[in-house]
Amino acid sequence: MPAFAVALPAGVITRIGGRDGVPVPDAPARGALRPDLDVVFRREYERVVSVAARVLGSRDQAEDVAQEVFLAFNRSSVPAGEAGGWLSVAAAHTALNLIRSGRRRASNEETAASAVPLAEPDVAEVVVTLEERSRVRAALARLPHKQAVALVLRHSGLSYAEVAAALDLSPGSVGTTVRRAESALRKELTRHASSH
């Protein structure tokens, strides 16, 4: 687990606040670190990276998202006991917005090109797998935001109760939301495949 950057460049904290659909209520003083940040960071870092990596398909990019999410958490007044759900939702939102913005298109092409070993006999299979993952991520980004986040959180290992708490849903509606999201994802993949 990388250490959380304590020395922040000027303006970084204000740049992060309120971005990517992550609400940032009543922030601590500018540049100040929350006293519970280190504990929350150590406890939740791997989960935040896992959620973002599930969306982005890249641990490096997921770690960048985690940095942004923890900076936003530092500015928030979210209690440490409720941080897990808040951070997971923030990671999913930030990663989905990164996909939607198209900022990672060039990076994806470079990653895909470097990930395909030229000497391997099954290069076609590797390329097809990369294209499939890319299609799924693009389709996920076209889903309604709440459905996409619920799907990502549930498939990142959060329990129904954790997803419900994170998204302010009743625990009984999480299964329905996830099933609808899975169905919408399938339809989106089919629709997109038939249009090409």
Image: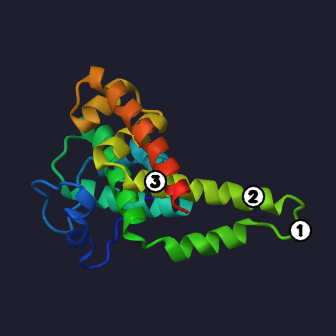
Question: Percent from the top left, x then y, of residue 119?
Answer: 89, 68
Question: Percent from the top left, x then y, of residue 169?
Answer: 23, 30
Q: How crowded is mark 3: few (under 14 residues within 10 Å), some or many (20 or more)?
A: many
Q: Mark 2 — residue?
A: 126
Q: Mark 2 or 3, which is nearer the eye?
A: 3
Q: Is mark 3 on a helix, strand or loop?
A: helix
Q: Can residue 119 be seen by looking at this rendering? A: yes
Question: Percent from the top left, x then y, of residue 88?
Answer: 36, 44
Give the CA separation, mark 2 to mark 3. 20 Å
Q: Mark 1 — residue?
A: 119
Residue drawn 42% across and 48% down? 48
Q: Which amino acid does label 1 sit on?
A: Ala
Q: Which of 49 and 193 is in front in this view?
A: 193
Give the CA separation, mark 1 to mark 3. 31 Å
User: Which image quarter holds the C terminus?
Assistant: bottom right
Classify residue 27 as left or right of residue 61: left
Residue 28 falls in which quadrant of the image? Answer: bottom left
Residue drawn 33% across and 41% down? 147
Q: What residue type is labelled 2?
A: Val
Q: Is residue 170 above or below residue 15?
A: above
Q: Which amino acid does label 3 sit on?
A: Ala
Q: What element carries label 2?
A: helix
Say whether disc 2 or disc 3 marks the residue closer to the N-terminus.
2
Give the CA separation, mark 1 to mark 2. 12 Å
Q: Mark 3 — residue?
A: 139
Q: Which of 103 and 86 is in front in this view?
A: 103
Question: Percent from the top left, x then y, of residue 55?
Answer: 47, 52
Q: How crowded is mark 2: few (under 14 residues within 10 Å), some or many (20 or more)?
A: some
